[in-house]
Amino acid sequence: MAARAPTPKTTPPGGERRRPQSTAARVGRGIQPVNAGTAVTTFLGFGTALPEHTIDGETSLAALSAFWPRLRGATPEPLTRHLVAPVEWLLRPRSLGETMRAYAEHAPRLARLAACRALAAAGVEPAEIDLVISVSCTGYLVPSLDVQLATEIGLRPDVTRLPLTELGCSGGAAAVAAAHRHLTAFAGDRVLVVAVELPTLTFQHQDRSFDNLTAAMVFGDGAAAAVIGAEPSAANGRLQVRGAVSRLLPASAGALGFDLRDGGFHVVLDRRVPRLIEQNLPDVVADFAARQRIGRPAFYAVHAGGPRVFDAVAAALGLTPADLAPSRRVFREVGNLSSASILFSMAGLSGAAGDGLAIAFGPGVTIELTHLRAHQKHPTEGS
């Protein structure tokens, strides 16, 4: 007699055990936080790296007006961005292969610089790192970026590697959440998070869409890294993570991301995104704050998506100009660095104190929230 096919299991690995459902979990409508109110992890050091080429708002408008003549006479944003190549090269046509070769040349170099600066700021040797989380959505490497990074900076052969490649601008915050989750189980470990993005390589010479124009106006290149540990280093003023959550907005999958075609990445930036943020962010933040037992945050680190994103966050949460000043400064100085932006914003929280909130947005549309706590002194960024 033929054996019957096994019945698919619907229970999680480990048996029939169920997590207790708290009242807070039901109120949250499915948002699942990372050990809310219990785990504490600490940023031991930050490091950032930027390429040598720069462009300001006025020069950017002049260069892009050749593709969008209506830009002539427009008022430029007071914005500086860093580029991995001269703007003339970035704006010319090229194949997907040529673009990926440029990514393979520059992304590992910037990731290495940021990682080494974070390790130096933390006082941690590369061989002490137990998990490395590498984040990038603007290029493709196999083996993944962390393999080259491990060889170049001296990570152990048995280091655990977690590459995150498809989370877009929310990837940096998601990596911090993953590090926080890992450290709640392995408290003696050290985690290195590295985010590197080269969005300027995604410019499409023949694409006259509003999406391509917006991306060309706001995105810059760069890398950021952080070393994270489980010890609650409150006494020395280091920034802490107290919890994290991810919320996927329904019916928003087509609003943000990349469309990969023969010529490369075509950015998708739906004009509805600021409205989606403004409509949904208040409830998501209120649920998370209730879970974390915090009131109104004392400070914010917001993904430097651009002026319309900042305005939507301010309107949704009733923020003052001072609340967003550190994050707007990041955008003004380096532009939108996709997944690396939130790490730049966290690293720039000098003088912050109390409970804070980091907010990042990515494809999905996804909202990533991180409950931060600062103790005034914040000496964790490498030079």
Image (cartoon, helix red, strand yellow):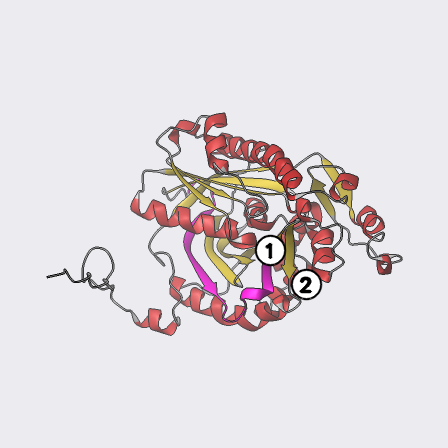
- C-alpha gap between disc 1 and disc 2: 20 Å
Q: Which residue is drawn at 49% across and 58% down?
A: 368
Figure quadrant of the C terminus: top right
Residue at position x 36%, y 43% in the image: 230
Percent position of residue 50, x then y: 65, 37
Tell me if mark 2 has few (under 14), some (14-19) or many (20+) residues whose alpha carbon lies within 10 angstroms of its own. few
- In the image, what residue occupies the spot 72% across and 57% down? 214
Q: Which of marks 1 and 2 is in front?
A: 1
Decide if residue 351 is in sight here.
no
Quickly name the residue at label 1: 258
Find out whether residue 269 is within the magenta segment: no
Segment tinted magenta in the rendering: 235-258
Observer-nearest residue: 355 or 135?
135
Dividing the picture into quadrants, the one containing residue 32 is bottom left
Tell me if 6 is positioned left or right of 120 in this view.
Answer: left
Circle number at residue 308: 2
Identity of the residue furthest to the left in this view = 1
Q: What is the secondary structure assignment of the residue under circle 1?
A: strand
